[in-house]
Image (cartoon, grey):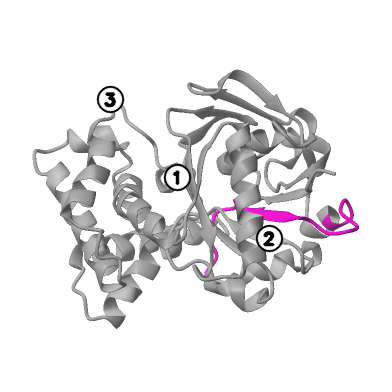
Amino acid sequence: MPPRFLIFGGGSIGAVIAYLLSQSIPPSDIIVVCRSNYDVISKHGFTINSTTWGSNLHVQPTVVKSVTEAAQHASNGFAYACITAKAVSDSSTRHAELLKPAISRQTTIVLMQNGIGIEAPYKAVFGDNAIASAVLYTPCTQTAPGVYSHTLLTQIFVGTYPAVDTPEHKASIARLVELLTKGGASATHDDDVQLARWKKLLINGSENPICALSRLRDAAFFRTDPGAEGFMRDVMVELAHIARKMGYDCIDEEVVDQQLGLLTSREMPGVEPSMMADALAGQQMEVECIIGNAMRMAHRMDVAVPRVEALYYLAKALNVSFLQNGVGSP
């Protein structure tokens, strides 16, 4: 009997994960909690146009409006609960609490959100469950309601939280990696996935706020001034310094240059990162998990990060402005 999956969040990442799983699991066993796009996805499902997997790929999962409704489709509980909704709430435990009706002791909780330091609230609420942290390089944007464009990268890194865990929890994550690989991803089971999170944060913590605040895609930003690329790199260097203070000594200048190279190699107009997409829509951005948590880690260790601080305070103020204008409620 195939494992039953809960996907909490019907956006771009939710669409990609639903597609990958549907290659080996019946869509009826993939339950997706959608909110603003419930009507579209419940009627038409997800359609993905990918430069890697192919065009007009369609998957029609079971779509529900709430976790409570999702629980009614899994009387014996879910094997996996994939959290793909953006972490925009000021309450770090909000999503964890919302999941309770659908989580059994056998459920592996898979965090597929951006940022750093996002796992502890879930461990606090679900202390006996396997917690998986996943880092995705699967650039995907919505081009029309329920229609998504995916390009080039298919890498997914998955590991337990904490890194040292039981054999049973490790086996559950190995099974997840197997399913994602079968679906078409380049999935890897990492012994310590936090290393992958810090590497990804070099991109997320610089590109996302810079593009959101400038309203320019990455390639377009680099062409605004000869110093633009250097500024992006300086932000990455500050984030790498935090990572090294956290014990990840391999996040060095070479890694900074590698990650920056992923951005500078893109052709015009470049990629629209998630925070920019939210800013253009007047929606709340993932400020806290992407740069707020990193900044607070730096403060605790007395690491100077003036550029990260500037981006954080400006991006947070932009979030507040959306709320004051009556849009972008958390």
* Image height of 213 relative to 95, above or below: above
Residue drawn where x is 23% and y is 50% of the image: 255
* Residue 145, percent from left and from top: 63, 31
* Residue 207, percent from left and from top: 31, 47
Q: Which of marks 2 and 1 is in front?
A: 2
Q: Quadrant of the N terminus?
A: top right
Q: Magenta stretch mostly in which secondary structure?
A: loop
Compute the Cα span from label 2 to label 1.
26 Å
Picture disc at residue 274: 1
Picture disc at residue 108: 2
Query: Does residue 130 appear left or right of residue 237 in this picture?
Result: right
Give SS at disc 1: helix
* Image height of 144 relative to 327, above or below: above
Q: Quadrant of the C terminus?
A: bottom right
Residue furthest to the top: 55
Q: Which residue, given by chain and number where applicable, does mark 3 sit on?
A: 267
* Residue 219, percent from left and from top: 26, 33
Compute the Cα span from label 3 to label 1.
18 Å
The amino acid on which the numbered mark 3 sits, given as a three-letter code, is Glu
Stretch of the chain drawn in magenta: 71-90
Taking the magenta stretch, the answer to whether it contains residue 187 is no
